[in-house]
Amino acid sequence: MVDLHHHLLPGLDDGSPDLPTSLEMARLAVADGITHIVCTPHASSRYAFNPEAVLTRAEELRVALEEANIKLQLGLGCDFHLSYDNIQDAVAHPSRYSINGGEYLLIELPDYTLSPNLKETFYELRRAGLTPILTHPERNPVLQREPQRMLPWLRDGLLTQVTAGSITGNMGKSAQRIAERMLANRWVHFIATDAHDPKRRPPQMRAAREIVSKRHGTLYADLLCRDNPMAVFKGRSLGEQEEGVELFDSKPFKERWYHRLFRA
């Protein structure tokens, strides 16, 4: 499995605080079946993104992984917050923030407010050659109340990443319910851990993959956990995707009978 969203690098944000913790997280990830991790420290007003520091910490971690005989391939990106300064810098220097210097960019929305200009922001980033991947929309309180707000973004080609812990219920019932809706409607393109530590938010994907495989089919589970994220890791275009349900339906977002059954 390939984990595109992981706060593994030590001492850069609210993820791993030190190298021993990073090694512990790496061991857990490998034991869970993860073979590739994109290290994604925050790029926000709270945690300034420093590409040079990221490269230094990544190289230190690669050496430590080799010495510890932990078989794990690392990639680099960031957890990009949509501040004005960030957006302008990303438009001017796309590869500074993207995954492995390619076209894909992980984007995190604010928790409690959504800008009315988000559609235009995504368009601006695409014009700069970036393909936005929206991280954990199922955990956003606004989108939990109004999931239909994602429809115009998805119609325009926005990709989405759901957190493994949301699928298993570790992120709360609201996140789990929206994650299931999105999966059933084929609105999800990636599953990732968003791991921050070994215990509270650990690097585990296998349980989520098994749930998706059981409810929505093995092919879809493999697409979200292996095929799509590997394409991003290697800087390739995604292969053929299952068509999203309701994306071009004029009717408002509705709760289907199997969603109600799942919630019950």
Image: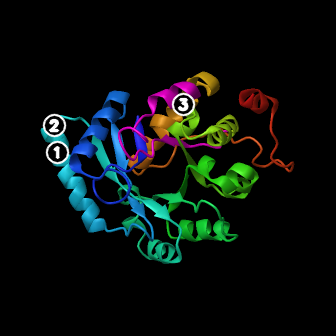
Q: How many neighbours does mark 3 have within 10 angstroms: few (below 14), some (14-19), or many (20 or more)?
A: many
Q: Would residue 148 be found to the left or right of residue 226 on screen? A: right
- From the viewer's perspective, is residue 132 above or below residue 226? below
Picture coordinates of residue 5, whole percent (x, y): 43, 48
Confirm or deny contact between disc 3 and disc 1 (CB under 8 A): no
Residue named by callout 1: 64
The kind of residue on which mark 1 rests is: Ala
- From the viewer's perspective, is residue 257 above or below residue 36? above
Q: Earlier in the sequence, mark 3 or mark 2?
A: 2
**What residue lies at 76% left-to-right and 26% top-to-bottom?**
261
- From the viewer's perspective, is residue 230 above or below residue 129? above
- Which residues fall within the magenta stretch? 186-212
Magenta segment, principal secondary structure? loop
Q: Hey, which residue is sitting farthest right in the picture?
A: 251
Q: Secondary structure at mark 2?
A: loop
Picture coordinates of residue 199, whole percent (x, y): 38, 38
- From the viewer's perspective, is residue 73 above or below residue 9? above
Residue 237 in sight in this render: yes
**What residue lies at 40% left-to-right and 56% top-to-bottom?**
99
For the N terminus, the image quarter is top left
Confirm or deny contact between disc 2 and disc 1 (CB under 8 A): yes
Question: What number is the disc on residue 152?
Answer: none
Question: What number is the disc on residue 221?
Answer: 3
Residue named by callout 2: 68
Confirm or deny contact between disc 3 and disc 2 (CB under 8 A): no
Assess whether residue 79 is covered by the magenta stretch.
no
Assess whether residue 207 is covered by the magenta stretch.
yes
The kind of residue on which mark 3 rests is: Ala
Cα–Cα gap, marks 2 and 1: 6 Å
